[in-house]
């Protein structure tokens, strides 16, 4: 009978004092392997640090077990130093696919980035943005006047998307959220749910007068003219969650929170 390979941990921690303290404690208790020798990464921090860790390990993806040493911690497990190996061995895996963004700026230069949560377009000045929205090559909205708009993954639907009154999406739904940010015209438009295969294009109208930036998680391009967004299923990222507290369960529970 084949036995499971031993769990070898690599710890990563944010700059917060509580995260650094946890790093010292856990590394001493469980050992801290180099990344190329580890088969599980333990991220210590908040949701922002989890996203940062996922981005840093895109080229050598390993499942990441996060423990909350930050503030929100929606993507993290509770911090408990005891029994870590047993928790990881029993953990439930969530596999997510990021968004690919191609942003074309005023100098017609292309900028490429991946977003695990969302790609957002945001006005840069006091002037509202004017955008044309196309899906799979067909114009769906000739002019959206707004503070911005975003495309969110299911994993990111509880982040900025939820704050902008977008829908919470179960991980297995295979849809993306297209959500306006403070839409002025059409005033009552609340966004759309798109199939995960959709390719979304934003054209910036009156770009010199109404400049817009594009942000893929924490990567920003300013003075964009055109932005293309689609799901990248060639990239798979794995997060580990305590048994009974999977990311799918958290997303579902969030829809019933008051």
Image (cartoon, rainbow, N blue to C red):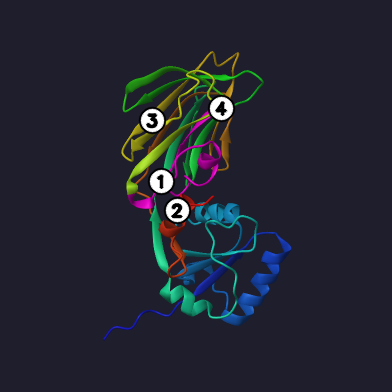
- Residue extent of the magenta highlight: 147-172
Percent across and percent down for residue 139 are: 35, 20
Tag of residue 182: 4
Which of marks 4 and 2 precedes in the sequence? 4
Q: SS class of the residue under badge 4?
A: loop
| Quadrant holding the N terminus | bottom left
Percent across and percent down for residue 190 are: 46, 29
- Please rate how many residues cluster around mark 3, counting C-alpha atoms within 10 Å: few if below 14, some from 14 to 19, many from 20: many
Q: SS class of the residue under badge 1?
A: loop
Inter-mark Cα distance, 2 to 3: 24 Å
Percent across and percent down for residue 23 are: 64, 70
Is 170 colored magenta in this rendering? Answer: yes
Q: Badge 3 is on which residue?
A: 200
- Mark 1 vs mark 3: in front: 1
Q: State whether residue 252 appears in this view.
A: yes
Which of marks 3 and 2 precedes in the sequence? 3
Q: Residue furthest left?
A: 1
Which of marks 3 and 1 precedes in the sequence? 1
Q: Badge 1 is on which residue?
A: 169
Assess whether mark 1 and mark 2 are in contact (beta carbons under 8 angstroms).
yes
Assess whether mark 4 and mark 2 are in contact (beta carbons under 8 angstroms).
no
Q: Is residue 251 left or right of residue 45?
A: left
Q: State whether residue 61 appears in this view.
A: no
Q: Residue furthest right?
A: 17
Point 49% across, 45% down: residue:
117
Inter-mark Cα distance, 1 to 3: 18 Å
Q: Nearer the viewer, residue 187 or 219?
A: 187
Q: Badge 2 is on which residue?
A: 251
Is 159 colored magenta in this rendering? Answer: yes
Point 48% across, 72% down: residue:
37
- Quarter where residue 102 is shown: top left
């Amino acid at each position: 009978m084949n036995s499971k390979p031993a769990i070898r941990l690599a710890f990563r921690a944010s700059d917060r004092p509580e995260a650094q303290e946890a790093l010292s404690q856990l590394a001493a208790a469980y050992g801290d392997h180099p990344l190329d020798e580890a088969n599980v990464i333990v991220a210590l921090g908040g949701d922002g640090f989890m996203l940062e860790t996922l981005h840093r390990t895109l080229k050598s993806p390993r499942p990441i077990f996060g423990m909350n040493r930050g503030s929100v911690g929606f993507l993290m497990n509770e911090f408990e130093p005891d029994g870590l190996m047993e928790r990881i061995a029993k953990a439930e895996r969530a596999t997510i696919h990021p968004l690919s963004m191609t942003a074309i700026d005023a100098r017609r230069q292309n900028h490429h980035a991946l977003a695990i949560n969302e790609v957002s377009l945001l006005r840069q000045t006091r002037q509202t943005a004017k955008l044309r929205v196309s899906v799979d090559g067909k114009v769906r909205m000739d002019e959206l006047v707004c503070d911005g708009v975003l495309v969110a993954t299911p994993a990111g639907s509880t982040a900025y998307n939820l704050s902008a009154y977008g829908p919470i999406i179960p991980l297995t739904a295979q849809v993306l959220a297209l959500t306006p940010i403070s839409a002025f015209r059409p005033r009552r438009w609340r966004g759309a749910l798109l199939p995960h295969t959709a390719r979304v294009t934003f054209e910036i109208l009156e770009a010199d007068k109404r400049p817009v930036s594009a942000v893929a998680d924490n990567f920003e391009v300013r003075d964009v003219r055109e932005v293309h967004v689609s799901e990248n299923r060639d990239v798979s990222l794995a997060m580990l969650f305590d048994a009974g507290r999977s990311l799918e369960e958290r997303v579902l529970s969030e829809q019933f929170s008051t």
